[in-house]
Image (cartoon, coloured by chain):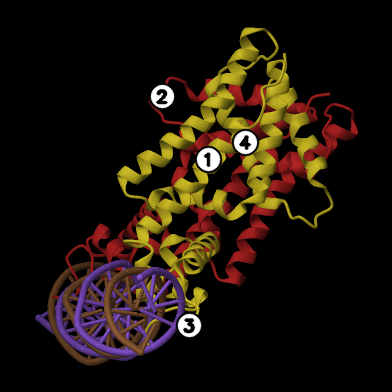
Chain colours: A yellow, B red, C brown, D purple
Amino acid sequence: MARTQGSHSDITGPRIRKAALSLFARHGYAAVSMRQIAAEVGVQAGALYNYTPDKQSLLYRLMRDHMHELLSAYDEVEAGSDPAEDLRKFVGFHIRFNLQRPDEVFIAYMELRNLSSEYFAEIETLRRRYEDQLESILREGQRVGQFSVADTKIATLAVIAMLNGVLTWYRAQGRLSLDQVEQVYWDMVRKAVAI
Amino acid sequence: MARTQGSHSDITGPRIRKAALSLFARHGYAAVSMRQIAAEVGVQAGALYNYTPDKQSLLYRLMRDHMHELLSAYDEVEAGSDPAEDLRKFVGFHIRFNLQRPDEVFIAYMELRNLSSEYFAEIETLRRRYEDQLESILREGQRVGQFSVADTKIATLAVIAMLNGVLTWYRAQGRLSLDQVEQVYWDMVRKAVAI
DNA sequence: CTTCTATCTGAACATTTGTTCATATACGGT
DNA sequence: ACCGTATATGAACAAATGTTCAGATAGAAG
């Protein structure tokens, strides 16, 4: 055998990315072999190399695409009338966006150390750009006297760490709806940065 | 050659655990080979098997010992006079304990998925036991009207997630002292659960 | 129908993996 | 000095790893 019936890069490409994403998230990048990914797609390992130059690039592209989607999705969020409203929108956006892509988020946080230094630097820059958006909100709120945090940089990281925690426990069929989750977290964030 | 000069299990054992801990934390369990650990200790790979039945148990014991240390260290913390004081003590304890053992904490959170299901269940139980201590504080504070959180379980996870975030950025030579870090986080936690 | 190209197979490769074991040497007690 | 035991070596193993590539078949275009 050689080329198989119905084979097409528009089909196989996304399936490879999807399989890699799911396996990386579940077992970790280093623990997943190219043959496992290939098997999940229903293809031989060699075929993967029509779609990625190597395993590392496969991981890198998943992370890069995710970060780009995150940044451009947040760009769509309209500015509110004051920092408090901006912060509320940020919290809602972050929770919803992340819960819709648990695997991507998980990988973006867990597999950084498996990136070569150039790739790592690029992903870090993207992540930093996202965090800066939150810090801008906190700084502006601080400036106009709406918030009170001892250190906006630390507060930024603290808020994001707190929100990311949702991923570790939230299940769609759980006792709380997405709206309720958002409300609970917004309450805590709002108070944490309050005067 | 065979047995080497000065070799002793009281020396080699801890060195193996220390090397494994450091390498697992830096590169991840799956990415580290037994030969790398052995090389770090200055020994051949076969010698490791005098100290662990297999690679998986090496990871498991590191995690289990860490969790036991965490729990018994927290047991030493004396109860305060009210929930607010207990919470402040918890925040201080958690930050300091974790910053003193960044590798252990990192592994305990990152490598759970590399544990077989029995090991996983055991470590999860220990972690849960720790989280329950915090939740008890929050519930008691809620009961006596000192705190106000919509959901103590979520608040517990949110606080711990937030505090764990310290590990991702804190450096001993950074611009903030440990006392300052503790103060900044305590401020946020205190307000987040406040009335 | 023919031709060109896209897509995959299947075998091969050099390394590396976790683990075992016979064997050898050093240590500690008598 | 001797002996039993603790502790290591170093070679070996089968299996798995990432990656390459010649060859084969399917699809698309004329």
- A118 vs A60, left or right, is left
Side of A134 relative to B39 (left or right): right
Q: Can residue B190 be seen by looking at this rendering?
A: no
Left or right position of A73 against A108: right
Q: Amino acid at mark 2?
A: Gly
Nearer the camera: disc 1 or disc 4: 4
Circle 4 sits on which residue? B162
Percent x, y of residue B160: 65, 40
Circle 2/circle 4 CB separation < 8 Å: no
Q: Which mark is residue A5?
A: 3
Mark 1 or 4, nearer chain start: 1
**Alpha carbon distance from label 2 to label 4:** 19 Å
Q: Secondary structure at mark 1?
A: helix
Tag of residue B98: 1
- Quadrant including the C terminus of chain B: top right
Query: Residue at the spot x=51%, y=68% of the render?
Result: A11
Q: Position of residue D25 (x, y in %)?
A: 39, 88
Q: Nearer the viewer, residue B146 or B68?
A: B146
Task: For mark 3, name the chain.
Answer: A
Disc nearer the start of the sequence (2/4):
4
Q: Amino acid at mark 1?
A: Asn
Q: Is residue B177 above or below residue A58?
A: above
| Helix, strand or loop at mark 2 | loop
Q: Which residue is mark 2?
A: B174
Q: What amino acid does circle 3 point to?
A: Gln
Question: Percent position (x, y) of residue B39?
Answer: 24, 62
Return the chain for callout 2: B
Residue A89 shows in the view:
yes
> How far, Cα to Cα, is label 2 from label 3?
60 Å
Which of label 2 and label 3 is nearer to you?
Answer: 3
Q: Chain of mark 1?
A: B
Alpha-carbon neighbours of circle 2 within 10 Å: few (<14), some, or many (≥20)? few
